[in-house]
Image: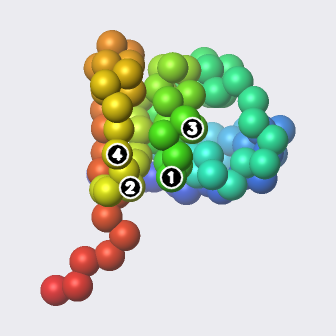
């Protein structure tokens, strides 16, 4: 079983600091890009930490940035509309799209 740790950094610098502190505590890291007020080069994060990263965001532009950076997993809201450019980018970069459903009532 894989262990996933969710991180909601306020800035790029805090993301780096948080990942350094917890890098050995999980197998995958779900990063909420929406919470970052100050953005940075997402490719640097992926190359430096060498752990599977899941990009989570509610905007296509943030998810596009993560895909361009080569993040292996892109977690998007179930109802998010994409475009051909995004789908092509995800396919070419070898990213796996994950659909997020907030809640299911059974």
In primary-sequence order, the first of circles 2 and 1 is 1
**CA separation in Å, label 2 and label 3:** 13 Å
Q: Position of residue 30 (x, y in %)?
A: 51, 48
Task: Find out whether the residues at labels 1 and 3 contact each other: C-beta distance under 8 Å.
Answer: yes
Judged from this view, the residue extending furthest toward the bottom is 106
Name the N-terminal-most of marks 1 and 4.
1
Query: Going by the image, does 58 lie left or right of 82?
Result: right
Is residue 80 found left or right of 28 in the rendered image? Answer: left
In whole angstroms, how far apart are the C-alphas of marks 2 and 1? Answer: 6 Å
State the CA–CA distance, disc 4 to disc 2. Answer: 9 Å
Horizontal and vertical percent for residue 105? 23, 85
- Find the distance from the CA under tag 1 to the CA under tag 3: 8 Å
Task: Provide the residue designation for mark 1.
Answer: 58
Badge 2 marks a residue whose secondary structure is: strand
Give the residue number, with chain letter if any, for mark 4: 81
Residue 39 at what x, y percent from top left? 75, 36
- The residue under label 2 is 77
Whichever of labels 3 and 4 marks the residue nearer the N terminus, that label is 3
Task: Decide: few, some or many residues near mark 2? Use Cα within 10 Å; few <14, some 14-19, many ≥20.
Answer: some
Residue 21 x, y percent position in the rendering: 74, 45
Q: Are marks 2 and 1 in contact (CB under 8 Å)?
A: yes
| Residue highlighted by disc 3 | 62
Kindly report which numbered mark, 4 or 2, lies closer to the viewer in this rendering.
Answer: 4
Q: Earlier in the sequence, mark 2 or mark 3?
A: 3
Q: Quadrant of residue 14?
A: top right
Q: Residues within 10 Å of mark 1 (few under 14, many from 20)?
A: some
């Amino acid at each position: 079983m894989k262990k996933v740790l969710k991180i909601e950094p306020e800035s790029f610098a805090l993301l780096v600091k948080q990942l350094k502190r917890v890098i050995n505590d999980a197998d995958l890291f779900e990063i909420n890009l929406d919470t970052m007020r100050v953005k940075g080069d997402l490719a640097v994060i992926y190359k430096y930490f060498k752990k599977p990263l899941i990009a989570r965001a509610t905007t296509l532009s943030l998810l596009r940035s993560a895909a361009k950076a080569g993040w292996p997993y892109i977690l998007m809201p179930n109802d998010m509309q994409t475009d051909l450019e995004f789908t092509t980018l995800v396919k070419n970069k070898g990213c796996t799209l994950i659909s997020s459903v907030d809640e299911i009532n059974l």
